[in-house]
Amino acid sequence: MAQTPEPVGLVAVPEVPGQGAAAGRGVLAGLVGAIAFTVFCSIVFAIAGGGALKPINLVAYTFWDSAPNSSRFHTGGLVLGMVILALAGIGIGAPLALLLHNLGPPHWALVLGLPIVIVNVLWAPGHYLIWPAIHPEAAGAFPPLWAWIGHSLYGLAFGMTTLALGEPRSVWGARMAQT
């Protein structure tokens, strides 16, 4: 069970056994979510005539003006865009997995629903405030509806992967195995 939180900087973090393994599962689930987001966005951009590489290029273009802001193939833009998407998936996934782990034995609906809600709460200011402040042209070229659906798919894929990986050495894993 959780011990009394010890102050770490400005916040108190509970000592819950298995946090390292949970963070590891969060990295994997975050990568799966990032893949779901990227594949969805690439498909809808391709169907709409923008090209499958355009969403990846727009991510790269945000931080590197030499990357194309179209669907044109560019090795550097593709690599940078994929690395940024993977790091974003991990950066959201690991803390989200720790949150779910520290909540205790959550119901499967919470494991599926909470990531979708949290990712979209993060997406709204990111898409409408932060991204336009960094690079307005790149942000304006990414339709909000597609970004919203893509982020929802990230959360769903994250939750499904988290459920599939389970926590075999914990109370939650034992409870999930019995249901």
Image (tube, helix red, strand yellow):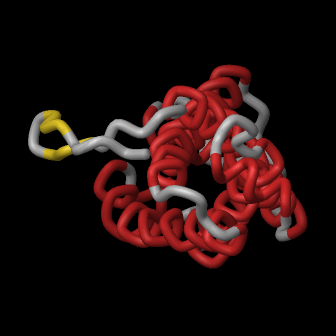
Residue located at (17% from left, 37% from top): 6
Is 60 placed left or right of 160 in the picture? left
Residue 127: x and y in percent read: 44, 65
Residue located at (68% from left, 46% from top): 34
* Image quadrant in which the N terminus is located: top left
Is 167 placed left or right of 9 in the picture? right
* Numbered circles on residues, count: 0
Residue 28: x and y in percent read: 70, 35
Up-down relation of residue 36 to residue 65 (above or below): below
Where, by quadrant of the figure, is residue 47 drawn?
Answer: bottom right
Of residue 22 and residue 1, the one placed in the foreground of this image is 1
Q: Is residue 116 visible?
A: yes
Where, by quadrant of the figure, is residue 141 drawn?
Answer: bottom right
Residue 5: x and y in percent read: 22, 43
Up-down relation of residue 18 to residue 75 (above or below): below
Of residue 87 and residue 19, the one placed in the foreground of this image is 19
Residue located at (39% from left, 56% from top): 131
Residue 150: x and y in percent read: 69, 64
Q: Is residue 71 visible?
A: no
* Image quadrant in which the C terminus is located: bottom right
Of residue 126 and residue 31, the one placed in the foreground of this image is 31
Q: Residue furthest bottom?
A: 145
